[in-house]
Image (spheres, rainbow, N blue to C red):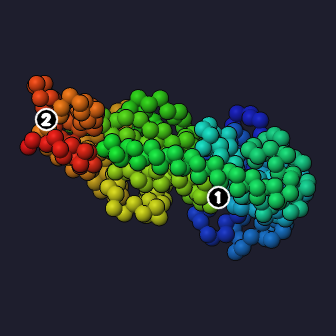
Amino acid sequence: MEIHENEVKKEKALLVEPDLGKWDAEASLAELYELTRSAGAEPLGAMKQKRPSADPATCVGSGMMGEIADFCGKFGANLLIFDCELSPTQLRNIEKISGVRTVDRTMLILDIFAARAKSREGRLQVELAQLKYMLPRLSGQGRELSRLGGGIGTRGPGESKLETDRRHIRRRIDSLTEQLRDVERRREQITRRREKNGRLTAALVGYTNAGKSTLMNALTGAGVLAENRLFATLDPTARALRLPGGETVTLIDTVGLLRRLPHNLIEAFRSTLEQAADADVILNVCDISSQEAPVHLEVTRNLLAELGCADRPVITVLNKCDLVRDLSSMPMIGRAVRVSARTGEGLDRLLETIEDSLPNYLPVKLLLPFSAAGLAERVRLHGAVESEEYTPEGCRLTARVPQALAPLLSDYIIE
């Protein structure tokens, strides 16, 4: 058992790691510490028990439950966080024995998402995930429902929603699903308009707290919230990024990933992740200073494969290289780009790599009549103009344009 002395916070948590052999317990526990801090609680320490399977009554054994109760009484812990998913029966029994409010890993992550979601779409996605998680747990939750109203694990759907019957919860789920479909339809219209205009996109994906938002701010000056905590950014952000050759692409920042991310959250945020998957080039951002960097890269690769991104160019971006002295001995680096979003190191090389990875640009000479001034503006915005001359017939342009824009210009190409 470990004891950590931290500054006093509102809630003091004891973390419980049931090592069932299904995951790397040490790495998962370290992640749970960060999740707990991100939720605003103070982790006082952790207890770990290796077991072949979870106890159906309390997840851990009776002896461990006695130690947990003693610890809470001695050190003043007022919150238990289990690094697994608990059944309603386990939750009720654990609270009865320990006398301390208890949440599981899924409830903790849902709570963080509920606190961080700012956009309408983000709030809809989080509430939908919470209700889907709560629906099978409504039975026998009379005591648990009475505890709502404050503390980790209680944010999101209000008391009135959770105390209604299953039929009302299902109606709310149907309503949220339909509202999200409307949001997705609007996003698809924006995507189609972007494709019609020839606008290329690049997407930042990767593990939570890898520095994606800091990198986006460094590249575009977007002013996106960037903090050293898990899931600081939930809502996707898009900004224009100018490349060295003069082309402009849309850079999209996305929600961070996590091992054992709750299935309902993956479903809820799938549309957001698919938006990134539709990008012309994908940046897999990784915190190279983390000992878990190879695992984080693999988590992202697996998700991209699941989303069907095999045909998209993926650039591995090793961020925070200023925190690592020697990168040469790391076998997973390969052709990855090393950068530091904080210091600016390697950003020029990253921009060149993005430019090289984008779909081919076509060199063209155009004569655009003055009535087609809108097309000339698109060439300036999305292509790289080498020369421009105004004549009585119209505007003569020598430029490199993305292939997606070429069909719109076919009637005006003179060479």
Q: Amino acid at mark 2?
A: Leu
Residue under the image location 53 percent in, 33 percent down:
225
Kind of element beneath mark 1? helix
The answer to whether residue 21 of the structure is visible from this angle is yes
Q: Residue 387, relative to residue 278: is it above or below?
A: above
Q: Earlier in the sequence, mark 1 or mark 2?
A: 1
Disc number at residue 264? Answer: 1
Quadrant of residue 200 within the rendered picture: top left
Select label 1 or label 2 by which is in front: 2
User: How many numbered tags mark residues here?
Assistant: 2
From the image, tell me which residue sits under label 2. Answer: 367
Quadrant of residue 44 within the rendered picture: top right
Q: Amino acid at mark 1?
A: Asn
Can you give x and y, in whole percent of width and height, for residue 257 in the image?
53, 52
3D distance between C-alphas at marks 1 and 2: 53 Å
Can you give x and y, in whole percent of width and height, for residue 309 in the image?
39, 60
Residue under the image location 70 percent in, 75 percent down:
52
Quadrant of residue 374 within the rendered picture: top left
